[in-house]
Amino acid sequence: MKNFLSVYTQPRIWTILFLGFVSGLPLALTASTLGAWLSEVHIDKTSIGLFAAIGLPYSLKFLWAPLMDALPCPVFSKLLGCRRGWILAIQIVLVLAIMGMGSANPADGVQVTACWALLVAFLSASQDIVIDAYRVEILDKEQYGAGAAAVQYGYRLGMLASGAGALALAYHVSWQMTYTIMAALMGIGMVTVLLSSEPAVNEAILKEEEENLDKPSWLRKTVIEPFADFMTRRDWWMILLFIMLYKLGDAFLGVMTNPFLLEIGFTKTQIAEVVKSFGLVATLVGLFLGGVMIERLGTVYTLWICGIGHALTNLMFLMQAKTGADMHVLMLGITLENLSGGMTAAAFVAFLSGLCHVHYTATQYALLSSLAAVGRTWLTTTAGWTSEHFGWEMFFIVSVVLALPGLFTLWLLTRRTSLEEPVH
C-alpha cells in the first residue's frame, strides 16, 4: 500500500489528473448542461433529445486518430513535440469553440447552437485521442492502475465543474458568461501541457515517421498497420467483443435511472443532492480502491471482482422499486453503485491502456474506447422499451443479466490467452 500511495506523488500522475480534468470538462457542456439551457429557453423536448446525436464524434474518433498518431502538429510540434503540440493546439481552438457556443443563443437559432456544440464535441473527442495516447506513453506498466484512477478522478471533477458547477453559475450570471468561464478553465490543461515533458518513446517514433513521410508506404503505416498490429493478438476479436459487452449492464441501467427515481416519487433536487454528495465521494473512493486492486491483484482479477460487484449493486434498485421513495435506500444504492462503478472504471481504463502498442497508441486506444462507447450508446436503446413493457423490477433483473455476457467473455479470454502480457 505504501508503495502504491507513493505513486500518486509523482509528477506524471498529477499531469494525468489535470489533463483528465480538461478532458472531462467539455462533455457536460454539450450534454446535460446544454440540455438545461435549451429547456430554459423552451426548446421542445423532441429537439432536445436529438441533441444526443452530438456525441457521435466520441464513437467515431478512431477514424481520424491515425492521422493524429502519425502526423506532427503543424503549429507546435517542433516546440513541444507531437503529443503535447497536438494537445495544446486543440485546446486553443476548443476554448474558442466553447466561447462561440456560449455566444449563440439557442432561442434565436437552435441550429447555430447545434453546429457549435458539434464542433466542441469533435474537438473534445480529438483532445481525448491525444491525451489518452500521452497518458499511456508516459507511464510504466506498473503505474497503469494509479494512472487510470488519476485520469478518472480528473475526468469526473471536470464533468462536475461543467455540470453542477455550470448550472450553479448560470443561476447567478448569463449563459454566455457561464460558458466563457468554462472555456477559461481549459487554461488548466494548457499550463499542464507547457510544464510537462514529451514521452521519450514518442519522440523517437516521431523522428522515424518524419523520415518516412514522403514514402508510398506512409498510408499503410498510418492507417492499416495500427489495426493490423492489434489483430496479431491472439483472440483479438474476442477482446473487442469483451470491450463492447463488459459495461453493458451498467449502461443499460444508467439510461433509465433518473426516469425511474422521478416516477417513484423523488424530486430532482433530492436526486441531485444524493448524487453530488454520496455519489461523488463514493466514485472517488472507488477509483482509488480500483487502483489499489490493480497494483495488488493485477488488471484481470480486478476486472472480475469489480464486474461481479458492479452487476450485483444493480439489485439495490430492485430494492428501491419495492420500498418506493425511501431516501435511506437511495443513499445506500447510489453509494454502492458509484463505489463499484469507480472501481470498474479504473480497472477498465487500465485494461485498455495495457492493450496498446506504443507505436500506435492514439489509434489503438481510440479504437478500443470507441467500441466501448458503441456498446454504451447503441446496445442500450431498448432500455426504455423494457421498463415500459415489463415493469421496473424486471428491468433491474435484466440489467444484472446483461452483465453476464461480458463476464462470460472475460472467462473465455482468461482460459485461452494471457491478458496481462504487454504488447509493447
Image (cartoon, rainbow, N blue to C red):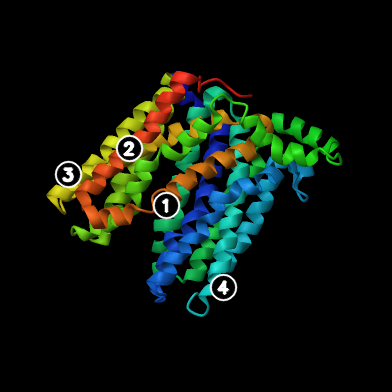
Image quadrant where one finds the C terminus = top right
Q: How far separated are the C-alphas under marks 4 and 2?
A: 39 Å
Q: How far separated are the C-alphas under marks 1 and 4?
A: 26 Å
Looking at the image, is 326 positioned above or below residue 6?
below
Determine crowd level at label 2: few under 14, some 14-19, many 20+ residues with C-alpha closer than 10 A: many
Residue 351: % across, % down = 49, 30
Which residue is nearer to you in this view: 115 or 338? 115
Residue 62: % across, % down = 61, 45
Q: How far separated are the C-alphas under marks 3 and 2?
A: 18 Å
Relative placement, left or right, of 340 versus 360 is left
Question: In terms of sequence position, does the residue under pointer 1 or pointer 4 come before the other?
Answer: 4
**Which residue, given by chain and number where applicable, does mark 2 sit on?**
339
Residue 150: % across, % down = 48, 36
Query: Which mark is in front, 2 or 1?
Result: 2
Q: Quadrant of residue 214?
A: top right
**Which residue, given by chain and number where applicable, does mark 3 sit on?**
319
Which residue is nearer to you in this view: 273 or 249? 249
Question: In terms of sequence position, does the residue under pointer 3 or pointer 2 come before the other?
Answer: 3
Determine crowd level at label 4: few under 14, some 14-19, many 20+ residues with C-alpha closer than 10 A: some
Question: In terms of sequence position, does the residue under pointer 2 or pointer 1 come before the other?
Answer: 1
Which residue is nearer to you in this view: 75 or 236? 236
Query: Which mark is in front, 1 or 3?
Result: 3
**Which residue, given by chain and number where applicable, does mark 1 sit on?**
160
Give the residue type at disc 4.
Val
Query: Which mark is in front, 1 or 4?
Result: 4
Query: Which mark is in front, 4 or 2?
Result: 4
Give the residue type at disc 2.
Leu
Which residue is nearer to you in this view: 338 or 64? 64
Mark number for residue 112? 4
Q: Residue furthest left?
A: 323
Question: In terms of sequence position, does the residue under pointer 4 or pointer 2 come before the other?
Answer: 4
